[in-house]
Amino acid sequence: MRRLSLSAIARAASSIDPVFLHSPQYRAESLGEVLGVDLVVKVETINPIRSFKGRGADFFVSELGDDATPLVCASAGNFGQGLAHAARRRGLSLVVFASEHANPLKVDRMRALGAEVRQVGRDFDEAKAAGRAYAAEIGGRYVEDGRDVAITEGAGSIGVELARWAAPIDTLLVPLGNGALLGGVATWFKAYRPETQIVGVCAEGAPSLERSWRTGHAVETASADTIADGIAVRVPIPEAVSDIQALVDDVVLVHDGQTIDAMRRLFVHLGIVVEPAGAVGIAALLAERPRYAGSRVATILCGGNLTPAQVTEFGLVAG
């Protein structure tokens, strides 16, 4: 039985904090011409946390009702910001566990939104284990992006908006990290736009979800080595793997060089700064141009949190 509810996704699409809803979606004409496709982008960076993660986090917290149990989560930074934004709005306490190497901009913003941030472990998955143990120790509620169903349903609200595009969409390219974004969006699209091919995009250096989708069960990898920290997952969530299994038509891998190229092209053609995880849909187009040539392709630019040093490093400067 499918975990995700179409009625819950529809409810999320009308009840989430309006600052996260109705993000811009439009034809990126000049970039599409360069790539040889009719390109539609949905920009999820124009909100208080510069990421789509606010949708799922806000819907999850709203579904708690009057439950004031302290919240604990782990995050590479964007989900932590989303949950901090939602928790502050409702007066809830939140502790976020992040790795020792987490993006410092994201860490600072989680703290600015009222979360206590503890940096533990060499990567996201080690931070996640520490967070789960801490929640058990204090009697808090451990919130897991990709496992808690309301988070995925909240992310699915993006699918509700994008499915309103007037013309048929041949392929939808969706960044794939823990699976919440892909699971939610694919659930809606396969119900209301079944003709659209849904393709998840993982980083080549973090292929655990690609391997999991192909085998049908969670496949852990020894490492997650990619600049795309937002999708750098090495320990998949079984529920998330199950959510996408029958809904996704393909999962592809892109290498970091293609992702950097995609980020630069987005800056040049659209004038926006997109972080690596948010640019992998464009990277997939760059990697397999013949596959998509002449078709209408949509992708979700799902985050834009870069430090000034990263902006310079990736060449996202005018000149």
Image: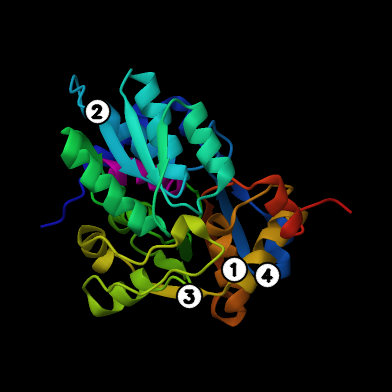
- Give the extent of the magenta segment: 148-164
Q: At which x and y percent is residue 56?
A: 35, 40
Mark 2 or 1, nearer chain start: 2
Mark seen at residue 253: 3
Mark 4 or 2, nearer chain start: 4
Quarter of the image where the N terminus is located: bottom left
Q: Are marks 3 and 4 in contact (CB under 8 Å)?
A: no
Residue at the disc numbered 2: 70
Residue at the location (50% across, 49% down)? 166
Q: Residue furthest right?
A: 319
Q: At which x and y percent is residue 319?
A: 89, 54
User: Circle 1 sits in a helix, a strand or a loop, which is it?
Assistant: helix
Assess whether residue 141 is covered by the magenta stretch: no
Q: Amino acid at mark 4?
A: Leu
Q: CA distance from mark 3 to mark 4?
A: 18 Å
User: Circle 3 sits in a helix, a strand or a loop, which is it?
Assistant: strand
Please give left or right for residue 35 compared with residue 91 in the image.
right
Residue at the disc numbered 1: 283
Within 10 angstroms of label 3, few (less than 14), some, or many (20 or more) residues?
some
Q: CA distance from mark 2 to mark 3?
A: 37 Å
Q: Does residue 1 appear anywhere in the picture?
A: yes
Within 10 angstroms of label 2, few (less than 14), some, or many (20 or more) residues?
some
Residue at the disc numbered 4: 35
Residue at the location (74% across, 48% down)? 271
Q: CA distance from mark 4 to mark 2?
A: 47 Å
Observer-side mark, 3 or 4, equals 3
Q: Amino acid at mark 3?
A: Leu
Mark 3 or 4, nearer chain start: 4
